[in-house]
Amino acid sequence: MEKIILDPEVINKLNELINILYDEEYFSFIESSFSYVDSIYDFISTIPTLPHKQTANKKFGKYYCSYKANRNTTWYITFDKLNEKFIIQYITNNHTEEYPYFISKIK
């Protein structure tokens, strides 16, 4: 059975995202921000079953999967695999300048 382990920094980033989305008025209701982040967590839970690609920079994981949250935002989740463990190392999206540094062959 595959196990997913999230780096504490990933958890912190997702928790902060809830407030950012609400404070910056991407969502009118805090519940909508929670729902958005829950959908990212739901996606992360499916990573063991998804095809994945190699990252360009192994600092935050050898592999990544991408999650298209909406027509404007794609999240990139980087991870390592050890036996049946998927260790989620990092999360970023296409709105940051850093994501090409970690992700290769973005389509």
Image (tube, rainbow, N blue to C red):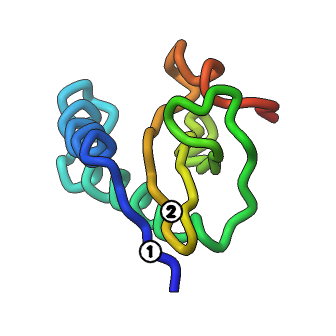
- Nearest the viewer among 62 and 66 is 62
- Nearest the viewer among 28 and 35 is 35
First-in-chain label (1 vs 2): 1
Can you say whether 82 is above or below 101 in the image? below
Q: Residues within 10 Å of mark 1 (few under 14, many from 20)?
A: some
Q: Is residue 2 left or right of residue 55?
A: left
- Nearest the viewer among 101 and 75 is 101
Can you say whether 53 is above or below 57 in the image? below
**Residue located at (65% from left, 73% from top):** 49
Which residue lies under the disc numbered 1?
3
Identify the element where label 2 is drawn: strand
Number of residue marks? 2
Q: Is residue 68 left or right of residue 44?
A: right
**Which quarter of the rendered picture does the C terminus lie within?**
top right
Give the quadrant of residue 14. Answer: top left
Q: Name the spot of residue 105 as percent of width and height, x first.
A: 81, 31
Three-letter code, disc 1: Lys
Contact, mark 1 vs mark 2 (Cβ under 8 Å) = yes
**Residue located at (54% from left, 13% from top):** 97
Give the quadrant of residue 22. Answer: top left
**Residue located at (63% from left, 27% from top):** 57
**Residue located at (49% from left, 68% from top):** 85
Give the numbered dot on residue 86: 2
Q: Residues within 10 Å of mark 2 (few under 14, many from 20)?
A: many
